[in-house]
Image (tube, helix red, strand yellow):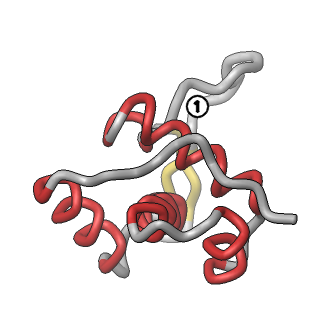
């Protein structure tokens, strides 16, 4: 039995424009595109289960991003800090087939 989300998404024209732009960008990271599409479909009134099926993801992911958008709007869709130990080695840069520290 599908559950209704307590988080109703209503977009301003500005937010809709930004999200539609993110959803259309081929060069954007997948995570940004999928988050934008989740919010756009939620704004259409679709249930989390339907959005998850359309975007081939889980209901929990849809629920997470719907809630974060409702609580923080567009900044809620940005990457948050991750826990864990800091990196011990610097990232590597590839130049001319050789890998060198940045």
The location of residue 1, given as percent across then percent down, is: 87, 65
Say which of 63 and 97 sits in front. 63
Residue at image position (32%, 52%) is 10
Crowd band around label 1 with a 10 angstrom C-alpha radius: few (<14), some (14–19), many (20+)? few
For this view, does 6 lie left or right of residue 95? Answer: right
Q: Residue furthest top?
A: 85
Q: Residue furthest left?
A: 14
Q: Is residue 83 above or below residue 51?
A: above
The local secondary structure at tag 1 comes to: loop
Q: Is residue 81 above or below residue 17?
A: above
**Residue 97 at least partly seen:** yes
Total numbered labels = 1
Residue at image position (46%, 70%) is 41
What residue is pinned by disc 1? 90
**Residue 95 at least partly seen:** no
Say which of 29 and 101 sits in front. 29
For this view, does 35 lie left or right of residue 83? Answer: left
Residue at image position (66%, 49%) is 63
The location of residue 101, given as percent across then percent down, is: 53, 39
Say which of 65 and 90 sits in front. 65
Residue 13 falls in which quadrant of the image?
Answer: bottom left
């Amino acid at each position: 039995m599908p559950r209704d989300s307590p988080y109703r998404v209503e977009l301003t024209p500005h937010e809709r424009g930004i999200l539609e732009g993110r959803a259309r960008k081929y060069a954007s990271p997948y995570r940004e595109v999928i988050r934008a599409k989740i919010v756009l479909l939620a704004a259409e009134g679709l249930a989390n289960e339907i959005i998850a099926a359309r975007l081939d993801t889980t209901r929990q992911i849809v629920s997470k991003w719907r809630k974060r958008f409702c609580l923080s709007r567009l900044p809620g869709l940005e990457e948050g800090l991750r826990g864990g130990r800091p990196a011990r080695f610097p990232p590597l840069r590839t130049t001319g087939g050789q890998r060198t520290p940045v």
